[in-house]
Image (cartoon, rainbow, N blue to C red):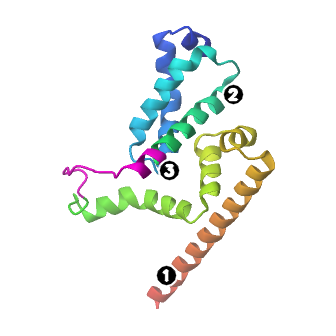
Amino acid sequence: MLTAAQRGEPWACTELWTAYSPMVAGFARVRGSREPEDLTSEVFLSLFRSLGSFSGDEGAFRGYLFTIAHRRLVDEFRASSRRPYIQLWTDDGDDRCTVSAEEEVVSASAEREILALLDELSPDQREVLTLRLVADLSIEQVAGIVGKTPGAVKALQHRALGALRRRLMDHADEAWIVREQSAR
């Protein structure tokens, strides 16, 4: 499929998009992109333009793809620091009105909790976990993308997972206390 995409075969490019765009969009969303879908499109446009010069296996391809995604995200952050972000009002974007409180809680609570947990991590820890878990990249690939040694990436991942584990245990303890108190 990769060879066919390098030749410009539309079906192969579609297959690459279908297989990898959800991972790239997830990476962009977790890392704080304001427009993760737009960023994903930009990543794939860059990928398809440069695909002819790529050589390697599927693992190297994922590393190449997420290197492009990482660079586009850095570009987005730099651009947003130079100019203010203006978001036009839309009914969908207005969080003062919801269909129902129950629907809002059910659909958004898990994502908010995950993002809140990730926000408690250092930026380096958050980036390493995102690349390792969302993008499913190897330690070496992540090290190449973030410009750190594989040992540093392993240490960041270990500390990040430990911090998340402790926070989840604290959350479980808090929930248990609340249940016990309400049972009395």
Q: Quadrant of residue 97?
A: bottom left
> How much space separates mark 2 and mark 1, taking CA atoms?
49 Å
Residue at image mark 3 = 30
Q: Which mark is residue 179?
A: 1
Q: Residue furthest right?
A: 151
- Counting residues from the start of the chain, the first of labels 2 and 3 encountered is 3
Is 87 in front, or is 158?
87
Q: Amino acid at mark 2?
A: Ala
Q: Amino acid at mark 1?
A: Arg
Residue at image mark 2 = 60
Q: Which residues are magenta?
A: 78-94
> How much space separates mark 2 and mark 3, taking CA atoms?
22 Å
Q: Is residue 102 above or below residue 153?
A: below
- Counting residues from the start of the chain, the first of labels 2 and 1 encountered is 2
**88 drawn magenta:** yes
- Counting residues from the start of the chain, the first of labels 1 and 3 encountered is 3
> How much space separates mark 1 and mark 3, taking CA atoms?
31 Å
Q: How many numbered badges does the structure rendering display? A: 3
Tell me the quadrant of the picture where the N terminus can be found: top right
Rendering coords of residue 39 (x, y %): 44, 37
**145 drawn magenta:** no
**Secondary element at tag 3:** helix
Which SS type dominates the magenta stretch? loop
